Image (cartoon, rainbow, N blue to C red):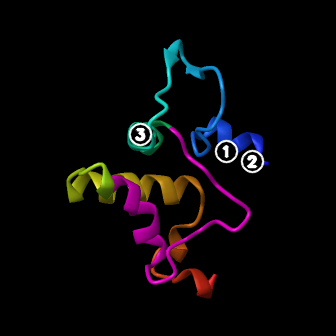
Amino acid sequence: MPRCWQYFAGLDLDYTGDYYFKEMKLPKSREEMAAYRLKHIGIVTQNYRLLSDRHCYDNVAFPLRCLKLDEKTIRQKVHETMTLLDVLAFKDKYPREL
């Protein structure tokens, strides 16, 4: 049985009824929900699911690249986010080094 976060994140679409977020009905197709999730939902699991072959910086930048943002904007957003979380010192580390 899926956990409730899977419903909220749109990872389990085998349910009856509808979900709404900010008065907007969420899509039930996997493709549309994946696009919605990319722009509106962040998930942090206990296992983090970091890309092991990429530095921390690239893990943070990955969803921004999926949104096709320009590199200058990506650099700015990654720097801001990592600074806010006080992890900028780890930007060049691989997940296994943390």
The residue lying at 52 percent from left, 83 percent from top is 94
Query: In the image, what residue type sits under mark 2?
Result: Pro
* Residue behind mark 2: 2
**Helix, strand or loop at disc 1?**
helix
Circles 3, 2 touching at the beta carbon (< 8 Å): no
Task: Using residue 80 as the reference point, say whether residue 65 is left or right of it.
Answer: left
Residues in magenta? 41-64
Label 3 to label 2: alpha-carbon separation: 23 Å
**Helix, strand or loop at disc 3?**
helix
Q: Position of residue 78 (x, y in %)?
A: 41, 58
The residue lying at 45 percent from left, 80 percent from top is 92
* Residue behind mark 1: 6
* Residue behind mark 3: 39
Choose mark 3 or mark 2, whichever is in front.
Answer: 2
The residue lying at 79 percent from left, 48 percent from top is 1
> Residue 45: which quarter of the image?
bottom right
Above or below 53: residue 23: above
**Helix, strand or loop at disc 2?**
loop
Of callouts 1 and 3, the N-terminal one:
1
User: For residue 36: magenta?
Assistant: no
Query: In the image, what residue type sits under mark 3?
Result: Lys
Query: In the image, what residue type sits under mark 1?
Result: Gln
Circles 2, 1 touching at the beta carbon (< 8 Å): yes
- How many neighbours does mark 3 have within 10 angstroms: few (below 14), some (14-19), or many (20 or more)? few
Of callouts 3 and 2, the N-terminal one:
2
